Amino acid sequence: MRCGILSSRAFAGRATPLYGARVIRAPLPPWPPEPAVFLDLDGTLIEIAQRPDEVTRSARLDVLLARLPGATSNAVAIVSGRTVADLDRLLAPHGLPVAGIHGLERRRADGKVIRAPVALDWMQGARDALDRFAETHPGLLLENKGASLALHYRSRPELEDAVQQFVADLDLPGAAERLQGRKVVEIKPRQMNKGAAIRAYMSEPPFAGRIPVFAGDDVTDESGFVAVNELGGVSVKVGTGATAASWSLPGVSDVLDWLTEAVSGRQSSTGVPAA
Ligand SMILES: [Mg+2]
């Protein structure tokens, strides 16, 4: 049996397995009967813009954000590289649990915000160096998130090699990690990632005991896919590329279709991969 409405669509998802991951199945990510839903934001629920402050929330997403909590017994959280403050600004008035800066700060379902204790003494030097680099390369955008630094080059894609080389050559301690995203390189404390944030949520109500679902589009989401796979959940890569996720969807509109039909109860509760 295939699951219903979407099964005839031609977006059967097969991504390239990464980290020895399972074979990607098609065509639809299944929707568990009692899901705990974790969603990346940029490139997953909203289209990526030239600058991170230029994104817009669609009316469809607005409806979805209003309905997801009721459809999941409030077990829904946004897991993003943005800060919690930025996520709240973008998602208002939907006061969902949110994990920001890849989990370095996280608001639980009970409203309490937890910030991972991190040593950031190395960051000032990195920030000064990145500042100087950005100043001499117009169009680059250095985003200071407090606990991480993100150098965006979406406006200067031809500088990708130069940006990556510069960041690779930065003298950083072992506690710092370089993360290559979509037209962005981020430097953050190594100790926290999206997988750890999802695991933390899964140990707390109302997420605990449910089946995790996680969708994301970027390399920074891979730790989340690994965690969700290990927890027996549903991992969904948005777009193409090597991934640990078990399922894939082509783009933002497909994610919104999938979620909308799931919260409407129109998708099979079990989901069956195509042969
Ligand atoms: Mg993303």
Image (cartoon, helix red, strand yellow):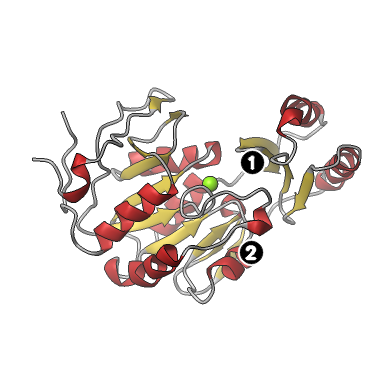
Query: 60 above or below 134?
Result: below
Query: 89 above or below 193?
Result: below
**Residue 83 or residue 25, whichever sits in front:** 25
Amino acid marked by disc 2: Asp
Q: Which residue is drawn at 39% across and 63% down?
A: 76
Residue ID for mark 2:
86
**Residue 210 or residue 219, whichever sits in front:** 219
Label disc, if present, on residue 190 of the rendered structure: 1
3D distance between C-alphas at marks 1 and 2: 21 Å
**Residue 57 or residue 222, whichever sits in front:** 57
Instruction: Judge the density around disc 2: few (<14), some (14-19), many (≥20) Cα neighbours within 10 Å.
Output: some
Amino acid marked by disc 1: Arg
Query: Under tag 1, what secondary structure?
Result: loop
Instruction: Judge the density around disc 1: few (<14), some (14-19), many (≥20) Cα neighbours within 10 Å.
Output: some
x then y, percent, for residue 54: 65, 57
Do the residues under discs 1 and 2 have CB atoms within 8 angstroms? no
